Image (tube, rainbow, N blue to C red):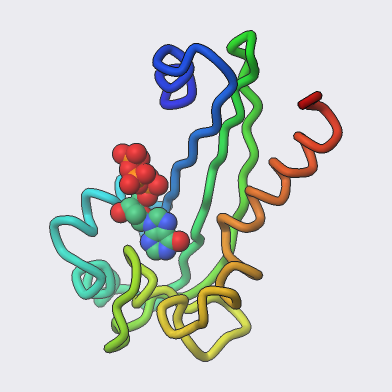
Amino acid sequence: MKALAAFDIIKGPCIVEDTSLCFNAIGGLPGPYVKWFLKATGPLGLYCMLKGFEDKTAMAVCTVAYVNEHGEVNIFSGETDGTIVEPTAVETFGWDSCFKPNGYEITYAEMPKEEKNLISHRMKAMYKLKEFIDHNVII
Ligand SMILES: O=c1nc[nH]c2c1ncn2[C@H]1C[C@H](O)[C@@H](COP(=O)(O)OP(=O)(O)OP(=O)(O)O)O1
């Protein structure tokens, strides 16, 4: 939908991106609706949503769509597993302050940007997109 809407406006090749944050305890919600949950409650509200659940695990998912000049869509997705924690004092972007990726003792918000960019859901999706463009798109 978003990809084709962008193609309608651009009328040429384009890339769109969408991010979800899926809580395993509640069947993957808020998922793609996280933008609206975050707006309503902030990272603290996201953390509090899981207070009644033992399972605090979550998956950050980035979906990138590449639309070629004919309007054909290719979709790439990157996932990073982690845990929802009480937001850290450092607030950087979105829900970064309450998402602690697996294998780290700090949240996305506490990492230098360069470090987040090495392990993030977005980097994984973008890497797949890069591989696709390198092999399939003549520039
Ligand atoms: O790495 C991230 N670390 C923390 N938070 C993040 C990240 N990436 C996106 N976010 C936030 C922004 C938005 O509140 C929500 C969904 O993102 P996303 O669907 O891409 O939002 P958006 O501003 O592009 O809006 P729209 O889909 O209506 O174009 O998660």
Q: Is 110 situated left or right of 69 in this image?
A: left
Does the rendering let one see residue 30? no
Q: Residue furthest top?
A: 70
Height in image: 83 above or below 21?
Answer: below
Estimate the x, y position of residue 71 in percent, counting from the top left: 58, 12
Q: Is 59 situated left or right of 99 in this image?
A: right
Height in image: 13 above or below 76?
Answer: above
Q: Residue furthest right?
A: 135
Residue, x 27% and y 88% (percent of image)? 89
Q: Is 130 situated left or right of 58 in this image?
A: right
The part of the image, by quadrant, that contains residue 54 is bottom left
Residue, x 32% and y 73% (percent of image)? 53
Estimate the x, y position of residue 137 in percent, counting from the top left: 78, 26
Out of 52 and 76, give the one closest to the viewer.
76
Estimate the x, y position of residue 58 in percent, counting from the top left: 46, 65
Does the rendering let one see residue 15? yes
Residue, x 56% and y 67% (percent of image)? 81
Q: Residue furthest left?
A: 40
Residue, x 46% and y 76% (percent of image)? 108
Estimate the x, y position of residue 86 in percent, counting from the top left: 30, 84
The part of the image, by quadrant, that contains residue 110 is bottom left
Placement of the C terminus among the 4 image quadrants: top right
